Amino acid sequence: MDALATVCDAIAQTNSRLKKVRVAAEYLRGLEEADFLLAVRFLIASPIADTERQLSVGHAKLREAVMRVLPWDEETVRLCFREVGDAGEAIGLLLEGHTRGDALSLAEAALWFQRLHAARTANAKVDLLEKIFLTYKPRTLLYFIKVITGDLRIGFQARQVEEAIAAAVDVPHAMVREAANRSGDLARVAAAARRGELEQVGASLFHPMDFMLAKPLEQEGAIENPAQWVVEDKYDGIRCQLHVGNGRIAIYTRGLDEVSGSYPEIVAALRAVPHSLIVDGELLAWRDDRALNFTLLQQRLARKTVSAQLLDEVPVAFVAYDLLYANGTLWLDRAVEDRRAELQRVWGGLGMPLLLAPQEGLGDLDAQFEAARTRGNEGLILKRAGSVYEAGRRSGAWVKVKRALATLDVVVTAAEQGTGRRAVWLSDYTFAVRDGERYANVGKAYSGLTDDEVRELTRVFRGLTTERFGRVSLVQPSVVLEVAFDGIQKSPRHKSGFALRFPRIVRWRRDKAPEQADDIARVKELYEASLQ
Amino acid sequence: MRVDHQAEGIHLPDIDLWLDAREPVGANWISHAHSDHARGVHRCTYGTPPTLALYRMRVDVPEDARLCALAYGDSVLHGEAKLTAMPAAHIVGAAQLLVEWRGERLVYTGDIKLQRPLCGVETRPVPCDQLIIESTFGLPVYRFLSCEQARERMVAFARECLADGATPAFLGYPLGRGQEVVYALRQAGVPVQVHGAIARYLPVYEEQGWQMGGWEPYEAKAGKGRALVVVPGMRAYLEASGRNVRVAYVSGWAALSNARTRAGAEFLIPYSDHAGFDELLALVRATGAREVDVVHGYTEAFARILRAEGIAARGITHATRQAQD
């Protein structure tokens, strides 16, 4: 773990993607198999092998434990956390001179993560952390904690870890990437790569894999040969992957988080399904044969328990539209027509709340789009005949047809540093509409501008910064952006009470002053209209 | 000795002496030549010879202004009080001031560091009863490299960039850091181009014995195969120029990785002309002061840490100053 910390420091100290990969690959190449696998796991900030389980070690426990080791008062320690902006880094820096400085091997680190996971009570976890904090080198502990908090923040994404694995074992990056997409389990892929068994890595139950994504029609241009496409409605719900089998059921979101507990009616219905399956589809609030507004579905998000009343008020359905695995057979690499036929066979006719997305041939695109909107859906998804399921890719074999609900001129009130390539820029913008004399936030967007524009805006926002909180700078309301979006929902997060769905920046309105931005009344008007 | 913290600066009313006054006053001590410390024209100004020379370069001082130079270790009588200048290592000429009056000893550190600087005279804690100290980096997350480690990192980064065909650019403030970086790189034989705002003060450093030898002035066109030492404002311009520039940030703030975004740099070298937390604490302890005023930076937090050690410490904030006015 000490060597891994040094490697992470070196990765952080360069912007060159090639250099980052080279440093990591050189390190990985020199490791025995067991250490190799652990190092990969820690590089993707995964403390324990079982990805479904969590350590349940949050900032509060970390701070409590570090307080026991340090001589300073809580206010000072809190101030340090705030100035540093990252729990792992703050703890690593604070512990300098307060630990024994023993060496920590990767295997021992893994063991500590296991123990932290196994400890039942909060107190037991804090006791363990205290012991850990007293023992090892502060720079190593800095990364040990970052693995727990789930982000190393060294500008090294999963894709680059794949590249490093590929370089370390001398196989083409594409092979590692494809295996990772299929299995959704980089640690397993690393093991297979090391043993030369990458081709054999397949999807497996309860390892959620990346979702296949669609390209927007605007990027694809016109659809050339309509006969080669099939069409489904594009639903405005929560994209999910169902895993069913071995007496277990799991629902994973795009973030690969498990959310089964929030949807007991879906889980209950799935128990009656006599197959083992991995199915791609959408969770929707559903009543009287149609999807309800996303705002209603929101009430069901992130709940640990769901009341009978809520189940009654906001019933949900799962609309399946693709099949990845069924009864021991992998369907990923089969043509869309074959996947559809098998999906129909194993899933068709199950009835509420387990539905099957209707599919038809491509005809009059505009008419089909309007029909989908009339059914309460967002637009269309086109799937190219003969195409396979490309996990984690946006290849153009799927095309989405959406049309923006409207655009708004908004004012930027805060700018946050981006990640990866954009880490040195203020590239994520929180924006607001006018509300009397004040500005009320309605959303956050980071896509749509060119690198040159982002670079220029970064300079502008540095000059407008009024206050800083770690990665976020509050800025004087001055810059006006035009944003397009697909919907409006109620939101407790923003002061305005509303949030735009899928906002993206259309252009920087250099010609407009903040006084000319849209106001809250316009947002309310659009919201009311969208409920119709 | 009474100490008043006022909007215009720190005032010692018993001997009517100001410390780093921000407005024109009677008698004033300038700890060093940074513009937040050396400003305004006063009836009588004390400072070390390099500080007064820099002060003249930066502030329009009339010919008849009374400047009283006090070299390190030298003393002068100011009314009943004896003033002695001691090294502070912060930038060239930076000094602590020891005030001895009716058997009491007060020390004002100005900006200070305890570790040996790349260019500068080493500091020693000055025993006293009362201490006025800065706390720019007065939180226990700020710890810095020694000057040898910092030099190694600067030179290694510059050489690696040059070997890759890239241009290393070091960001530094015009007075202090910039000259230290030039000195470290030139000592190792790395060719450098220096921005005018920094180059302007190189002769003052050379006069004090740190020979820079063979630097070139910064030019927008040329510069291939050279390391650049420029002011922070140049970064965006250099990046926009389309050159393959890689930016290093040499600063105390570089101790935290969020400095990458704040400074827009990829390579961080946590080296400062201020004391890190451990140095500050060691300095206070070594002076033996029982009363401490903390005047800049994390004043409240650092004062609280001192109070926990049984020292009567005050964190001086804007609010305290207003209350005393």
Image: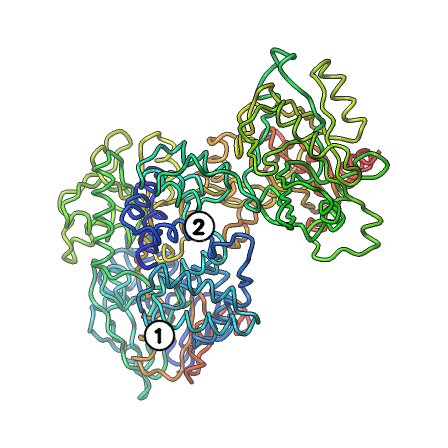
Chain letter, disc 2 residue: A
Does A350 sit left or right of A190 as displayed?
A: right
Image location (x, y in percent) of residue A471: 50, 50
Q: CA distance from mark 2 to mark 1?
A: 31 Å
Q: Is residue B192 above or below residue A129?
A: above
Residue of label 2: A153
Image location (x, y in percent) of residue A530: 79, 34
- Residue A438 seen in the current view: yes
> Front-most of A78 and A58?
A58
Q: Are marks 2 and 1 in contact (CB under 8 Å)?
A: no
Residue of label 1: B281
- Residue B234 seen in the current view: no
**Element under label 1?**
helix
Q: Amino acid at mark 2?
A: Arg
> Front-most of A63 and B86?
A63
Callout 1 crowding tier (Cα within 10 Å): few <14, some 14–19, many ≥20: some
> Front-most of A125 and B107?
A125
Q: Which residue sits furthest right?
A: A288
Quadrant into which the N terminus of chain A falls: bottom left
